[in-house]
Image: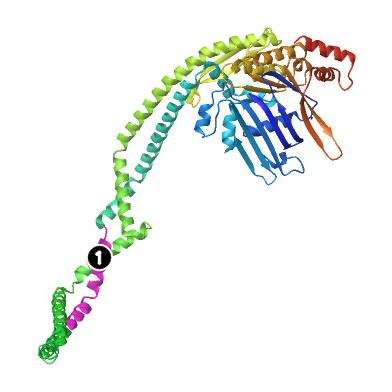
């Protein structure tokens, strides 16, 4: 329940701090006095979009804050899920907006997302404005009314889960069918490309090895000549040219000959001997390599042709590396494997779709049965609620038709049919109901579903449009009845018959000074209520007859 509302620097409101009460309250005031501004401020607390033009002219920021009584609202799970403080009794929502365009939201002084405000607000207040009467013609609204009365949320949630499973299975099947079709169209191309790639027998590292082999084969003569000369330098020619290893042996012998006189010479000789051993190994490897280097034009041609084929495939498939070609080969294999097994895969996916559809239809039929039972109750209660509102011959019917295909809401289409007169055929309510009739139907629907949902506060913004006299009084009695049992109902109205039945009465008015216009709201005393109702009855000039009429209206409460 909304306990208090504080507004500062919002639109025409400089500062406002007002307390609200349980039960049925009314708000009155002249057109343009600021009633819509009040609703706009509450809307910000419910997560509506904030705009800088909402800030009072000349001010840098605005603030809207409301305190709610949460007893009996069953909201602990929301606060726990969002890691918010919760004492089980009260909650404070706050919204701040600066001229720089920054908007901040708080729940119990904890910074919150606007989406959190919106979710919490939807469980605290229902604001019924005039444009919401258009909802009556929308199928999803009519369906939601039936679902609320049916109390089928648990079944609908399960149905929604099954519907999502069915849609996922259908999408997978359709994707597989399209992939199979594309695969069949590209099968010859893929098999040809795969055969060319498989002929290369690609393996990681083979390209680098082949490139190295090609370089050796191309320069075989040059390599063999270099190895021969290196061997000659190391070993000599056995004649005039002395090799490095022979010179090293001579140097070691010379050093050993003086080792007795110069001990350090022995160490140098041993180091030279180590070098000689290493050079002997190098000499052996050089000789062996020279013997194995062959000029092989046929091998060179084979390696060159293989490399050329690899480079051609890289260019053809727009890849740069051997690994990319290997991955492409495997991709072709996998796609062809899928294609080869596509019939079995399609059969498996089709079976999944059938299974999901069977489960969906079974749950959908449960939902339909609950809605059909609820439809009877809606028809009965709506006729009982509408008859006292000046439509004694009302007929109200809820038709439920099967959808051509299931959707997220179920298997059903719901249509509200309405007739206000005995000789009028039932027709969709949006096609025949007048403005006043729609207002009464909407109020009756709100009264019907208010008992099924634990919504603590309902605000009606001129729900009385198109009605007057005793019909307005009966609508007020209905709202007053809705305010019993701990619920809070607030009606913004221009009709004295409705205003008189409020347990609490607030007046919105504008006040001008030399520089600005500001809106105010005050709770009226019993004497002030008489005056306000008198003005509503007689206009600007307050007559004695209007005063007496106002007192009579209040005495009849």
Image x and y of residue 428, in percent: 62, 17
Viewer-proximal residue among 531 and 232: 531
Residue 360 seen by the camera: yes
Question: Circle 1 sits in a helix, a strand or a loop, which is it?
Answer: helix
Residue 306 found in image quarter: bottom left
- What residue is rendered at 40% in x and 38% in y? 175
Q: Dominant secondary structure of the magenta stretch?
A: helix
Residue 441 found in image quarter: top right
Image x and y of residue 351, in percent: 34, 28
- What residue is rendered at 67% in x and 45% in y? 101
Viewer-proximal residue among 442 and 176: 442
Let me know if residue 217 is in the magenta part. yes
Quick one: which residue is furthest to the bottom in this view? 240
413 lies above or below 516: above
Viewer-proximal residue among 51 and 330: 51
Mark 1 highlights which residue? 210
**Image position of 151 (left or right of 358):** right
Let me know if residue 142 is in the magenta part. no
In which quadrant of the rendered image does the N terminus lie? Answer: top right
Residue 497 found in image quarter: top right
Viewer-proximal residue among 257 and 196: 257
Residue 40 seen by the camera: no
29 lies above or below 213: above
**Image position of 465 (left or right of 174):** right
523 lies above or below 514: above
Image x and y of residue 37, in percent: 73, 32
- What residue is rendered at 56% in x and 23% in y? 73
The span picked out in magenta is 204-231
**Image position of 469 (left or right of 216):** right
């Amino acid at each position: 329940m909304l306990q208090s509302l504080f507004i500062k620097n919002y639109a025409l409101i400089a500062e406002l701090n007002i307390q609200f009460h349980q039960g049925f309250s009314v708000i009155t005031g002249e057109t343009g006095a600021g009633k819509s501004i009040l609703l706009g401020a509450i809307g910000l607390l419910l997560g509506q979009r904030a705009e800088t033009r909402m800030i009072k002219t000349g001010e840098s920021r605005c603030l809207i804050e409301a305190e709610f009584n949460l007893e009996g609202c069953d909201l602990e799970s929301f606060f726990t899920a969002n890691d918010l403080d919760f004492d089980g009794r009260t909650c404070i929502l706050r919204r701040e907006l600066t001229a720089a365009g920054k908007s901040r939201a708080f729940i119990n002084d904890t910074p919150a997302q606007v989406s959190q405000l919106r979710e919490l607000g939807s469980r605290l207040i229902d604001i019924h404005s005039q444009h919401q009467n258009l909802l009556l013609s929308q199928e999803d609204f009519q369906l939601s009314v039936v679902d609320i009365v049916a109390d089928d949320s648990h079944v609908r949630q399960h149905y929604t889960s099954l519907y999502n499973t069915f849609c996922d299975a259908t999408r997978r099947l359709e994707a597989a069918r399209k992939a199979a079709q594309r695969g069949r169209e590209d099968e010859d191309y893929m098999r040809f490309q795969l055969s060319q790639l498989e002929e290369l027998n690609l393996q990681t590292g083979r390209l680098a090895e082949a490139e190295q082999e090609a370089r050796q084969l191309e320069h075989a003569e040059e390599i063999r000549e270099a190895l021969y000369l290196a061997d000659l330098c190391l070993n000599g020619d056995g004649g005039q040219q002395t090799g490095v290893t022979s010179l090293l042996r001579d140097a070691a012998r010379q050093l050993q000959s003086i080792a007795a006189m110069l001990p350090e010479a022995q160490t140098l000789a041993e180091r030279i001997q180590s070098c000689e051993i290493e050079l002997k190994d190098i000499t052996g490897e050089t000789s062996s390599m020279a013997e194995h280097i062959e000029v092989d034009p046929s091998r060179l041609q084979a390696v060159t042709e293989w490399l050329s084929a690899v480079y051609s495939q890289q260019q053809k498939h727009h890849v740069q590396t051997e690994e990319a070609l290997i991955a492409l080969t495997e991709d072709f294999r996998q796609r062809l494997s899928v294609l080869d097994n596509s019939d079995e895969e399609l059969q498996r996916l089709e079976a999944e779709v059938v299974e999901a559809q069977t489960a969906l239809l079974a749950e959908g039929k449960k939902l339909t049965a609950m809605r059909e039972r609820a439809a009877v109750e809606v028809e009965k209660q709506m006729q009982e609620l509408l008859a006292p509102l000046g439509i004694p011959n009302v007929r109200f019917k809820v038709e439920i038709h099967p959808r051509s295909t299931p959707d997220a809401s179920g298997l059903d289409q719901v249509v509200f049919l309405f007739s206000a007169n005995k000789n009028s055929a039932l027709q969709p309510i949006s096609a025949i109901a007048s403005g006043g009739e729609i207002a009464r139907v909407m109020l009756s629907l709100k009264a019907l579903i208010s008992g099924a949902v634990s919504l603590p506060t309902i605000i009606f913004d001129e729900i009385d449009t198109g009605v007057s006299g005793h019909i307005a009084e009966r609508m007020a009695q209905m709202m007053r009845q809705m305010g019993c049992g701990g619920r809070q109902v607030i009606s913004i109205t221009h009709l004295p018959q409705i205003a008189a039945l409020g347990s609490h009465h607030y007046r919105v008015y504008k006040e001008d000074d030399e520089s600005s216009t500001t809106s105010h709201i005050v709770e009226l005393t019993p004497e002030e209520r008489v005056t306000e109702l008198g003005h509503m009855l007689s206009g600007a000039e307050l007559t004695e007859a209007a005063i007496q009429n106002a007192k009579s209206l209040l005495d009849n409460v």
